[in-house]
């Protein structure tokens, strides 16, 4: 009982703080946006002022093989639409309060991913349709047979790729995310099943999964074994710097298999990853640097991580 009362008191206190923050958010968006925010925290500048950094690559630090196949990306309309929408959503006070309350209850026994799946929030953005097409060097009308999206999350990123495919297969670890994927009518395969269906896939996407699963090296080899061996392509995104850890319920664990990624800056880690992919039977055909965006909550308009996105060809 004491614990419960303590918890309620804490929550009310938090609400008071949020209310205070909220008035500043209101100020920021309606009155003296730039001035007021610069005083508060300089790194909360509007995205169109900071976003050019998200795409930068120092080509001199790339290895000889990789330098010519780097694709320069930029803040395009699809990315802006996601960001504008995310900023708008994080401004809906009652929904954000509800999400925050529910997460604090569920986080005692559920992973963050599963809570997001349950509440239908925290959608992610990797690439726009145009960015996807440029990476794969395909036109908007290009069609193929089978896509397999491993660790598809809520399926919002799958949706960007899906118009190009007749059949769309997905895998997920989190049950609440599986519900979201079934709602979107994707064919969900079990995480131990996709390697053994006997199908070959024209494109396999493995987006932001290698650093969140227990056996990244095995996963790469399994992808190689079910990929169509000549025209097939893997599209793989990885957050750098590489920090592998696996969500288990509400806890974080070290992965059971070690993937060797060395180097300190983005370009060096990319060079080292090319060797990892080669080991698994792939060669890098093209790659780019993109922001990995996540919808915000009541504290932030959006979240951003640093992605390297590769197109891999089987050898
Ligand atoms: C960071 S999210 C990426 C979601 C989406 N692909 C994206 O790029 O936004 C990683 C997802 O992989 C799932 N996952 C973790 N291990 C997995 C495994 N072995 N097989 C399939 N999915 C897995 C997690 O539940 C989580 O939803
Ligand atoms: C996003 O919002 C910015 C600033 O309000 C605006 O300039 C831009 O045109 C919007 N872009 C899209 C694609 O909605
Ligand atoms: C880092 O990886 C590169 C490429 O795989 C390799 O040539 C180099 O020896 C590695 N360095 C260390 C310190 O392991």
Image (cartoon, rainbow, N blue to C red):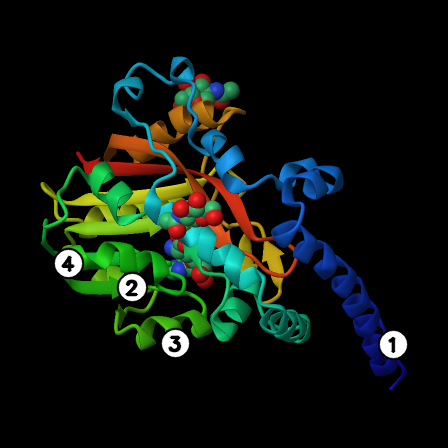
Q: CA distance from mark 2 to mark 4?
A: 13 Å
Q: In this rendering, is residue 121 above or below 276?
A: below
Comes first in the chain, label 2 or label 3: 2
Q: Which residue is mark 3?
A: 179
Q: In this rendering, is residue 168 above or below 200?
A: below
The kind of secondary structure element at disc 1 is helix
The kind of secondary structure element at disc 4 is strand
Q: CA distance from mark 2 to mark 3?
A: 12 Å
The image quarter in which residue 145 lies: bottom left
Q: Which residue is mark 4?
A: 165
Q: Position of residue 104 (x, y in %)?
A: 68, 71
Q: Which residue is mark 1?
A: 6
Comes first in the chain, label 3 or label 1: 1
- Dot 2 alpha-carbon crowd within 10 angstroms: few under 14, some 14 to 19, many 20 or more: many
Residue 208 or residue 198, whichever sits in front: 208
The answer to whether residue 149 is left or right of residue 258 is left
Q: Position of residue 296 (x, y in %)?
A: 55, 57
- Regarding residue 94, the answer to whether it shows in the image is yes
The kind of secondary structure element at disc 3 is helix
Query: Do the residues bearing badges 2 and 3 touch, measured as CB atoms within 8 Å?
Result: no
Q: Which residue is mark 2?
A: 170
The answer to whether residue 266 is left or right of residue 136 is right
- Dot 1 alpha-carbon crowd within 10 angstroms: few under 14, some 14 to 19, many 20 or more: few
For the point 20% across and 49% down, which residue is it? 225
Q: CA distance from mark 4 to mark 1?
A: 53 Å
Q: CA distance from mark 1 to mark 2?
A: 43 Å
The answer to whether residue 12 is left or right of residue 159 is right
């Amino acid at each position: 009982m004491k614990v419960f009362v303590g918890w309620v008191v804490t929550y009310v206190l938090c609400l008071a703080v949020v209310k205070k923050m909220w008035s500043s958010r209101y100020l920021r968006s309606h009155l003296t946006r730039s001035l007021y925010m610069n005083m508060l925290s300089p790194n909360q500048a509007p995205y169109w002022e900071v976003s050019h950094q998200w795409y930068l690559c120092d080509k001199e630090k790339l290895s000889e093989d990789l330098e010519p196949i780097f694709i320069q990306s930029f803040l395009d309309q699809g990315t802006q639409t996601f960001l504008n929408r995310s900023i708008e959503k994080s401004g809906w006070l009652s929904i954000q309060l509800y999400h925050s309350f529910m997460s604090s209850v569920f986080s005692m026994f559920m992973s963050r991913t599963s809570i997001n799946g349950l509440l239908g929030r925290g959608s992610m953005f990797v690439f726009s349709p145009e960015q996807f097409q440029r990476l794969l060097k395909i036109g908007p009308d290009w069609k193929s047979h089978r896509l397999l999206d491993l660790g598809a999350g809520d399926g919002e990123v799958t949706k960007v790729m899906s118009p190009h495919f007749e059949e769309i297969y997905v895998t997920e670890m989190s049950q609440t995310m599986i519900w979201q994927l079934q709602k979107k009518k994707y064919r969900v395969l079990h995480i131990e099943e996709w390697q053994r269906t006997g199908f070959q896939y024209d494109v396999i996407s493995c987006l932001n999964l290698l650093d969140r699963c227990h056996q990244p090296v095995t996963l790469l080899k399994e992808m190689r074994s079910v990929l169509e061996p000549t025209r097939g392509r893997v599209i793989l995104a990885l957050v750098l710097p590489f920090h592998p850890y696996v969500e288990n319920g509400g806890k974080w664990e070290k992965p059971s298999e070690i993937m060797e990624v060395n180097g300190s800056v983005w370009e060096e880690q990319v060079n080292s990853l090319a060797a990892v992919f080669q080991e698994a039977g792939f060669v890098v055909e093209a790659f780019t640097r993109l922001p990995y965006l996540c919808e915000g909550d009541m504290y932030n308009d959006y979240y951003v991580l640093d992605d390297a996105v590769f197109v891999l060809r089987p050898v």
